[in-house]
Image (cartoon, rainbow, N blue to C red):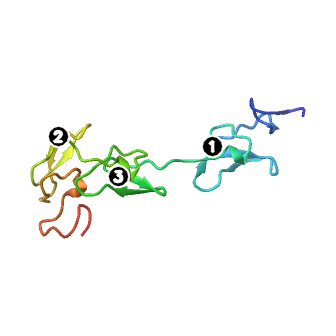
Amino acid sequence: PTGQTSLPGSESCFPGNTTCQVGLYYDVITSKCAVCPENLTSNAGAVKVQECYHVKKTCNPGQYTLNDICLECMWGTTSYGKEAKLQDCFKPSKNCSANYFNTGVNFTDCEICPNGMISQIGAAKVEDCRSENGSCPMNFY
């Protein structure tokens, strides 16, 4: 129709001066940009809700994702993070001494556990460090 446009490959039209931003899509019923459903996003210019897609969970190194939740790799193992799965957790090739943990880009360096924490030989990440009595992991009391 006159005064409306569509993006290449799209079957939907919207007013020529409307371009929805990232995370929005053009709702033909309200003739406005609408927010994608929860846990979904879109590219700029999305013209229908079907163009909203799931965002993959990104975890930190030493973690893996399960059902969009970041979990710590098992003791003595680590991961490169991002979209790692449980099977992506690995034991670093460098075996650190007691009270140290693996660090560095390829987990080839060792760093002392922070704040007087201790660890067993082979700690793969800072979360493997424990309090002096050994009962609480890093960041727990």
Please identify the quadrant where the C terminus is shown.
Answer: bottom left
Residue depth check, mark 1 versus mark 2: number of the one nearer the observer: 2
Residue 42, which numbered label? 1
List the residue tagged with mark 3.
Answer: 63
- 54 vs 82, left or right, is right
Q: Identify which residue is drawn at 26% across, 51% down.
A: 77
Q: Position of residue 56 (x, y in %)?
A: 51, 47
- 8 vs 99, left or right, is right
Q: How many marks?
A: 3
- Label 1 environment density (alpha carbons within 10 Å; few <14, some 14–19, many ≥20): many
Q: CA distance from mark 1 to mark 2?
A: 40 Å
- Label 3 environment density (alpha carbons within 10 Å; few <14, some 14–19, many ≥20): many
Q: Position of residue 86 (x, y in %)?
A: 38, 52
Q: Earlier in the sequence, mark 2 or mark 3?
A: 3
* Circle 1/circle 2 CB separation < 8 Å: no
Q: Position of residue 69 (x, y in %)?
A: 44, 58
Q: Identify which residue is drawn at 16% across, 65% down.
A: 131
Q: Position of residue 70 (x, y in %)?
A: 40, 56
Disc 1 element: loop
Amino acid type of the residue tagged 3 in the rendering: Gln
List the residue tagged with mark 2.
Answer: 109
